[in-house]
Amino acid sequence: MKTMICFMILLLGASPLLATDLTRILLVTGVDYPGHKWRETAPALKRILEADPRLEVRIVEDPHFLDSAALTNYAALLLHFQNWEVPGPGAAARENLRRYVEAGGGLMSVHFACGAWHDEWPEFQRLVGRVWHGLNGPQHDPRGPFIVRIVDPAHPVTRGLTDFETDDELYTCLTGTAPIHLLAQAKSNVDHKDHPMAFVRDYGKGRVFLTTLGHDVKAYTNSAVPQLLRQACAWTAKLPPVEVK
C-alpha cells in the first residue's frame, strides 16, 4: 500500500516524505508552575513545529527522561518545564543534557524553562546563556500587549520577520554573562529598559535558542511567534532555512 501511495504521489509531481526522512524533535514537559497550563501548551507547540513538514515532535511528560541515552535519537530538544517547588532533574540528567548539546544536539528553551535549574546547576546558565533569576524582585511586566523588535532580521531564526505585537509576559528577570547573539528584544512598560525576547548561542558543537515568550496557548499562537519557533527549531536541528515568501 505504501509503495502504491508513493508511486501516485510521484505521478502527481510531488516528492513523498517518508517517516524515516523526518527530523525528530523531543519536547520535554510535565512539571511546571501551576499558572502554566503545559497540558494545553505542549500540544500547541507540537502543532506549531510540525507545520514544518520536515519535523516530527514527540512529547515526553517527565523531565527525568533527560538522563536517557535515547536523547541522541533526536536532532533537537525543546525544554518546556519548570516548577520551583520541586528540584529539577538530577546530576545524571544534567550531565547527559550537557554532553548531548556539546556533542552537537540542538536545544530550545521557551518561557519559564529558562528557570529549569536556575539555582541548582551553575552550568545551565552557560548552557542556555541567560536564566530566570529566582523569586526575589520583579520577574516580568503584567500580562498584556507589547512590541517585539527584531534586532537581527538576517539570522535564519528571524529571517522574514519584522517587528510584531504579541500578548504575553515580558520577562525582565534574566541574568547571565555568557556570550549571546541577540535576535529580538522588547521594552518594559515598568522599568522602561530593553530586555531580550529571543537569542541564540553555540555550546560546543550544539546550537541553542532561548525565548522568554510563551505564557499560554494564546502567547504561542498569536502574531509571528509560530514562525519564530519553527525557524528556531529548524536552526537548532541544523536544517536549512525554508524559503520565506
Image (tube, helix red, strand yellow):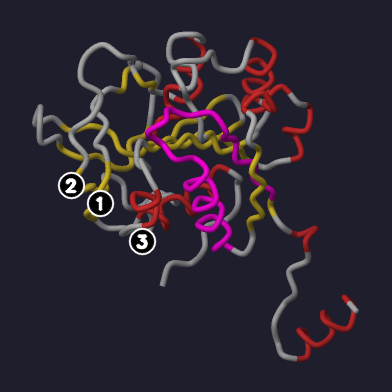
User: Dot 1 corresponds to which residue?
Assistant: 166
**Above or below — where is 75 with respect to 173?**
below
Q: Which residue is mark 2?
A: 146
Q: Amino acid at mark 2?
A: Phe
Helix, strand or loop at mark 1? strand
Residue 125 percent location from the top left of the image: 44, 17
Q: Residues within 10 Å of mark 1 (few under 14, many from 20)?
A: many
Q: Is 25 one of the magenta-colored residues?
A: yes
- Who is closer to the viewer here, 244 or 114? 114
| Image: 5 above or below 107 | below
Residue 134 percent coordinates (x, y): 34, 14
Dot 1 or dot 3: first in sequence order is: 3
- Element assignment for label 2: strand
Frontmost of labels 1 and 3 is 1
Going by the picture, which residue comes out furthest to the bottom? 11
Q: Which residues are magenta?
A: 24-52
Res 163 quadrant in image: bottom left
Mark number for residue 160?
3
- Circle 3: residue type: Gly
Q: Alpha-carbon neighbours of circle 2 within 10 Å: few (<14), some, or many (≥20)?
A: some
Asked if the stretch drawn in magenta spans residue 98, the answer is: no
Determine whether, in the image, residue 91 is placed left or right of residue 147: right
Residue 61 spot, x, y in % from top left: 63, 36
Q: CB atoms at circles 1 and 2 under 8 Å apart?
A: yes
Spatial separation of the CA atoms under disc 1 and disc 3: 17 Å
Q: Nearer the viewer, residue 215 or 228?
A: 215
Q: Going 25% across and 49% down the picture, which residue do you hit?
A: 167
Label 3 residue SS: loop
